[in-house]
Amino acid sequence: MRVVIVGAGAVGSYLAERLSLEGQDVVVIEADAARAQEVQEQIDCLVVHGNGATLESLQAARVDRADLFIAVSSSDAVNVLAAHAATRLGAPTRIARVEDPQLREEAMELGVDLLIDPGEATARDLLLLVQQRGVSELIEFADGRLDLIGGFISPEAPVAGLTLAELRRQVSGWSWIVVAVIRDGGTMIARGSTQILAGDHVLFMTESAKTDEPFRLLGIHESPAKKVVILGATRLAALTARAMCEAGIDTTLIDHDPERVRAIATETAKVVAIAGDPTSPRLLKSEGLDTADAVLALTGWDEINILGCLVAKAIGVPMAVARFHRTDLVRLLAGVGIDAGVSSRLSAASQILRFVRRGNIRSVVTFQDSDAEALEIEVGETSRAASATLRDLHLSHLMIVGGVIRGQQAFVPRGETTIEAGDRLIVIALPGAIHEVEQLAG
């Protein structure tokens, strides 16, 4: 597949690197000469230096040969104009990052197939996390009837030291299943012989109304946050503050920029906005951070976010969440100084990757500390999965089916579950199994 990407910022460069490693033919258009050179040296792709909204740059990138066009620069106007020009040049599928609500309707009229706003999507993810405090990920499928949940295993957790086969003997019914274990940067798709250790990052699929047992066995203590402190005054921080206040959560926002703090306080009347150093232990204590249920570090700088989380944990805040760009920093501190991480580029990738994956793939989810993906696929009439049991499919050890959506039903399958054409499967897969997942969709 040939993919043309306009913008080599955090989102564009992440997509270019990921798609390039998968063997896709990637072309990046970047207006900043130094950034264009940097991307050319770091990523195996073609880089065109130029304005992505001009026909000259788009023709240099051979957009007429592209299967997918993605405009994710920092400028809404450039993204909309670039997508419109790509439509005229014959690009079959156009995706644009547009944050301004007033531009969205116009963008659709100009030929954009998918509008994405990573900030809004990330703010929604943060609200879900604090509403079910104690988990590192919470991804909803089947309109909230199935949840893919992540959590870190404490030494006191009943499951610590057990293999998944031993754990299965302690489980009543079949309403949840461990699908992956992330340890030391590596991801293991769950098998009966997989042993769970303290400190592991575990992903499990569960029917949403039946989380009590997996939470107890995995040592996850669910406790919805009532008071949240947000560090930073970025657009993501403002969107998140608004979402928290609308959900009835007591919200305080701290940032060193008085003008930005004042603007957020004006936009969101219920937020308590304070101008000051978001990493100062004295300030954080004086503003009641030690009584907060969660701190969300959402500045534009990884280092400040990590330091803010570490200070919050030292003060005694139960949950610390960091916005990040560099995954290596978050992986190093995951479960120790940081309970969960969020990233606008991961959010954007999750929205875009389903256009790259082939077959009847409805959605894709990526993770902060793993190269695994959760894919929702629809089983076609010609799929080898239709009318077969999961056990008889002999799926790769690099993938696992964690959920089945059949009409109004949503459930966790067993080995003897027969798959029907039209079923939607939630599949967790490592990169080596993506092609098999696509084939499974038919």
Image (spheres, helix red, strand yellow):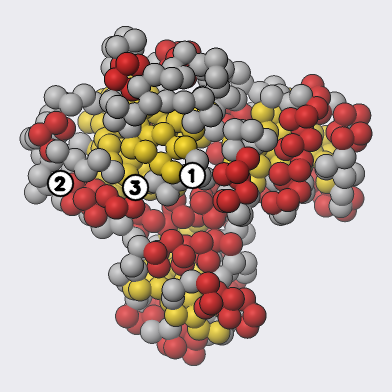
Q: Quadrant of residue 251?
A: top right
The residue pinned by badge 3 equals 430
Q: Amino acid at mark 2?
A: Gly
Q: Earlier in the sequence, mark 2 or mark 3?
A: 2
Mark closer to the observer (1, 3): 1
Mark closer to the observer (2, 1): 1
Check if mark 2's residue and mark 3's residue have beta carbons within 8 Å: no
Q: CA distance from mark 1 to mark 3?
A: 13 Å
Q: Amino acid at mark 1?
A: Gly
Rendered position, 328 above or below 130 = below
The residue pinned by badge 1 equals 185
Residue 380: mark: 2
Rendered position, 264 above or below 203 = below
Residue 196 falls left or right of residue 375: right
Whole-percent x and y of residue 205? Answer: 37, 28
Q: Residue at x 50, y 41 (%)?
A: 184
Q: CA distance from mark 2 to mark 1?
A: 34 Å
Q: Earlier in the sequence, mark 1 or mark 3?
A: 1
In the depicted view, which residue is nearer to us: 240 or 302? 302
Q: Residues within 10 Å of mark 2 (few under 14, many from 20)?
A: many
Rendered position, 235 above or below 428 = below
Count of numbered circles in the view: 3
Whole-percent x and y of residue 12? Answer: 52, 66
Q: Residues within 10 Å of mark 1 (few under 14, many from 20)?
A: few
Q: Residue at x 51, y 50 (%)?
A: 347
Q: Residue at x 86, y 52 (%)?
A: 257
